[in-house]
Image: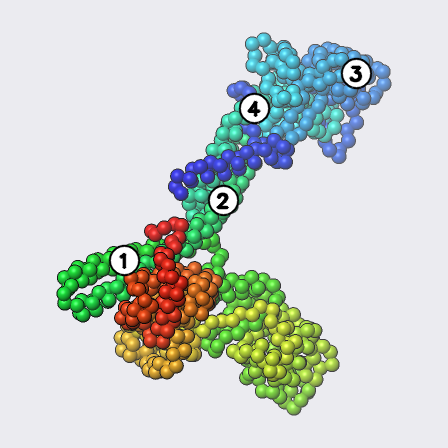
Amino acid sequence: MARALPFRAAVVGVAAGLAALGLQLAGVAPLDGWAYARWRRPAPASGSLVVVAREAGVPHSIDAGALARLVGRLSRAGAAVIVLDGALLASGGGPAAEALLRHAIAQADSVVLAVAPESSPEDGPPARAVGHALGLPGRGLATVPLFTGAGDRRIPAAGLVAAAMAMNAQVVTAGDTATLGPGAPRIPVDRDGRVRLSPSDGLRTIPLGAVLALVERNDAERLQDVARGKIVVMLAGPVAEGLALQAELANALVTGTVLRAIPPVWTWAAVLALAVGVAWLWLARRWWVALGITAGLALGVAGLVAALLRLGTVSLLTAPLGAMVVASLGAVAWRQLGARRRLRDLEGQVRSMREALVRRESAVEILEEDLDAARAAVERSTGAERELVRAAEALRTQLAEARAQEAETRRRLETLARESQAVAPAGQADAVAAAVGIVTRDPAMLVLVRDLERAARSSLPILITGEPGTGKELFARAAHGLSARAAQPFVAVNMAAIPPDLFESELFGHVRGSFTGAVSDRKGWLEQADRGTIFLDEIGDLRADHQSKLLRVLQEKSFYRVGATRPTRVDVRVVAATNRDLERGVAEGWFREDLYFRLKGLVLQLPPLRARREDIRLLAERILDEAAVEARRRSVTLSEAALAALERHDWPGNVRELQNCLRQAAALADTDVLGVADLRLPLPRAAAAEPGDAEAAVLAALRRQSFDMQATARALGWDRSTVTQHLKGLGFRALVETGGDTGRAAGALAGDAALVDTVAVKLREYHAHLLRTVQAFDSADAAVAACRRRFKNLPERYFRSLESLVRRHFEMGRPTPTPPARSRGGDP
């Protein structure tokens, strides 16, 4: 697993990085995953450009004459370059004013005329240079075409021409690129011939009206402050995108802040490395650690981008953050899929180990029987005593080895079970049970919890059945807590405790004056549970006439209060419970069939405590913790003997009886460790006289313990060999009844499809051992007599089945017994 981790992280990270970059290249996300750096070192040209623009919403009338005076005064004030918006040429003012404007532009010798590409600059004033006024705002980065076509001519950008004039340089073109003089670095452009500009902190902008006022007042000193040594960009209107971006271009060229693209492979490498690292985090660390480190990385990337922006490198966050998000989600998905695959592998190993455990256990049982037989033979024989002693010692050695192998197999099985629980994804039934206060590890109970969790999301009615004290109300509250109605009321009603004459008043409510004693309006249980859940306990004790009234309410979702003339509508989730057999009640006629099917949305049959004895330890610990607090004691625990006594007891009152027993013991005991005497359990009843009852009890215990002989012996308070002899006898009888079909015999004994393979392995072992025992005999009678001695511990009632198997073996010509089949994985 550790070796595969770097490979999985690399696969997930590369896929995430490529996905993030692919989205940007496809245009789905802004193209800010590329990085740009400054073209060259910035020149100290602070305040190298000023924009004169008409204020929005404040019209200023300017004709050609006023514009001529403004151009002349700015030129005399020392403006390095005057960029004149072509739209200003349409100001009007007559032929004389236009001639004056042409003369002022010609005299200034520093005017750049910014025109639209479709204009014809030949007919305009004699400006020193002409440039286009295009500019394209972008998502994060603005772009300006360096050249554009106008008929058969190529017009450079007005900002390029203005920067060249301000720097006393010459624009040298080379295809779609240009340089500002021979030997100067080439101005970087993208593949479309456009220059990329970094976000500007804002250019100095002066209202046109303020500059005109300075001209009118002949304020030469202030005009020099505005224009001396600067590029002055004059706009016809408010600051617009096109010519304003030309001003940005001129400023960037003068100050050296034009952006050039960093090689894309660098960006790809950085993003992929970040994605691989994040994927490794999510695959190698716990989710909260990975989440914290990923959040820290995201903040670090954001801080790095901010720092690079100050240094002149622009690289926004979509690519790295997108790659981190995709890598995190991909790694989580991979981890979940891997956990499920690992869980399936572990489950397969557990099944193989269980089969191996069954074989080891059977081998131990057979060796124990062989050892007993050898001891008996030693006692009977005197001539071959030495040989038999050696055989007995060899059997002891084999038995010790088999027991050691069985113990090792059990240890590995427990380890695999713990691993499978650790690998199982979060949100399973045991976590849900713990969240709602249900204490169990019993597989059957966990199945019920899973069903309850799924059904709780809907408004499906739930019917909970089971003996008293099995936790029906706890499951009802869990159904309410897991549903969308958890914030609404939960109302529990004991239907058996409602007096018959008050049924309608209690359930539906009444209005004032409806009967004697009704001094005010009262809401019934159903109305109190509106939008929530109502728990109808002991629903099986409801009278027939009350059943019909309840059925009508469940069907129509409305009822009449006692004495009311208008119906009341409610929206309630119904959870019912009973310890009676409602199907039998329907058959016998004391429970309405239509009401039964109305309540039977999901039926949960809670098992009694005696059917899930492995939960007794967990329940006892929880109850004793609460009892210690109630009795004001520091802590109360159980001795091993007391716990064994609790596990052997049948608990007819289920969890409620267990709770009362432990609370009484905690309150009355003198010590903090409870013994068997402190529990005051009733003496066990005498064993049933009928053999069938004993067989049923043993078989039920075997099924509860999944045919684990050691666990069954501990639960029954027997030794393991006694349990083995009972199962062996039951197996012999099942083989006789099924004509030797091991699969059918195992199915009859297992009672659960999941246990059939385990029982089949045991039956094959027992049958093969029986055939090996009788193989040396020539007649069935001699073999049966030997089996009487050999299987002397087998209960007498099973010898007839054993004899039938032996005689059938001899009738079939005594075929050589086939050794039991082993699993493909082999013994561990």
- Circle 1 SS class: helix
Residue bearing the label numbered 2: 334
What's the amino acid at mark 1?
Ala
What's the amino acid at mark 4?
Ala
Q: In whole angstroms, how far apart are the C-alphas of marks 2 and 3? A: 64 Å
- Crowdedness near tag 3: few (<14), some (14–19) or many (≥20) residues, C-alpha within 10 Å: few
User: What is the number of the mark on residue 799?
Assistant: none
Residue bearing the label numbered 4: 261
- Circle 4 SS class: strand
What's the amino acid at mark 3?
Ser
Nearer to us of marks 3 and 1 is 1
Please tell me which of labels 1 and 4 falls first in the chain: 4
- Crowdedness near tag 2: few (<14), some (14–19) or many (≥20) residues, C-alpha within 10 Å: some
Residue visible at 38% across and 64% down in the picture: 809
User: What is the number of the mark on residue 402?
Assistant: 1
Please tell me which of labels 3 and 1 falls first in the chain: 3
Residue furthest to the bottom in view is 516
Residue bearing the label numbered 3: 120
Residue visible at 48% across and 58% down in the picture: 428
Q: In whole angstroms, how far apart are the C-alphas of marks 3 and 1? A: 105 Å
Nearer to us of marks 1 and 2 is 1
Q: x, y (%) of residue 589?
A: 62, 83
